[in-house]
């Protein structure tokens, strides 16, 4: 999840994209770019047993730090909103729990963002932490019995290519 147009806010999308570029994802695993969507994720979330979310996360830890929180550690609550278009992850999880349709196992792999400017590329701190975040996602899947095989050829994801283009245009 996250907004790739706001630098490190998009770290979750970039981590999942990197995971797909580096590893073969088996058919029993559904990978979604949740971006900044809200209610659009309701159906996919209610239909899964285990949910692993990659996202930027607020924490007093240093920028680039990785955080793992799971199940009851994850706060699910309805926040006051000015518009129904502002539903966030905590609102979705609260709705799923209220309806008794929350996944059995929920984990958030998060990174503390450094920069939230209107740019596509990640900060140096987020870029440096990206491989470790991908490793945490892979380890989380392994804990669930899903082993990811490395791809023979690793490509670049769409958002990495866009960040490279942005960097070249600014040089």
Image (cartoon, rainbow, N blue to C red):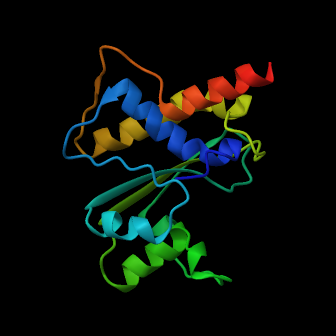
* Residue at 68% from the left image edge and 34% from the top image edge: 122
* Residue at 74% from the left image edge and 53% from the top image edge: 60
Numbered-mark total:
0
Q: Position of residue 2 (x, y in %)?
A: 58, 52
The residue most toward the left is 27
Q: Nearer the viewer, residue 33 or 123?
A: 33
Note whether residue 91 is visible.
yes
The image shows residue 129, relative to residue 35, as above or below, that is above
The image shows residue 106, relative to residue 141, as above or below, that is below
Q: Nearer the viewer, residue 56 or 7?
A: 7
Q: Position of residue 7 (x, y in %)?
A: 69, 42
The image shows residue 31, relative to residue 90, as above or below, that is above
* Residue at 27% from the left image edge and 62% from the top image edge: 48
The image shows residue 51, relative to residue 165, as above or below, that is below
Q: Nearer the viewer, residue 149 or 160?
A: 160
Q: Is 118 on the left or on the right of 100, as rendered? A: right
Tell me the quarter of the picture where residue 120 sits.
top right
Q: Is 3 on the left or on the right of 89, as rendered? A: right
* Residue at 41% from the left image edge and 65% from the top image edge: 41
Q: Position of residue 63 (x, y in %)?
A: 73, 41
């Amino acid at each position: 999840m996250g907004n790739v147009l706001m630098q490190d806010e998009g770290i979750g999308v970039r981590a999942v994209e990197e995971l797909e570029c580096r590893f073969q994802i088996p058919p029993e695993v559904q990978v979604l770019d949740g971006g900044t969507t809200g209610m659009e994720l309701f159906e996919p979330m209610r239909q899964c047993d285990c949910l692993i979310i990659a996202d930027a996360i607020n924490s007093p830890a240093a920028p680039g730090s990785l955080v793992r929180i799971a199940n009851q550690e994850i706060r699910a609550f309805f926040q006051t909103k000015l518009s129904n278009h502002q539903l966030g992850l905590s609102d979705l999880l609260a709705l799923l729990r209220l309806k008794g349709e929350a996944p059995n196992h929920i984990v958030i792999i998060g990174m503390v963002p450094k920069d939230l400017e209107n740019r596509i590329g990640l900060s140096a701190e987020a870029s440096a932490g990206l491989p470790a975040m991908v490793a945490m996602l892979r380890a989380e899947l392994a804990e669930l019995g899903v082993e990811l095989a490395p791809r023979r050829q690793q490509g670049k994801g769409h958002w990495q290519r866009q960040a490279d283009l942005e960097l070249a245009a600014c040089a």
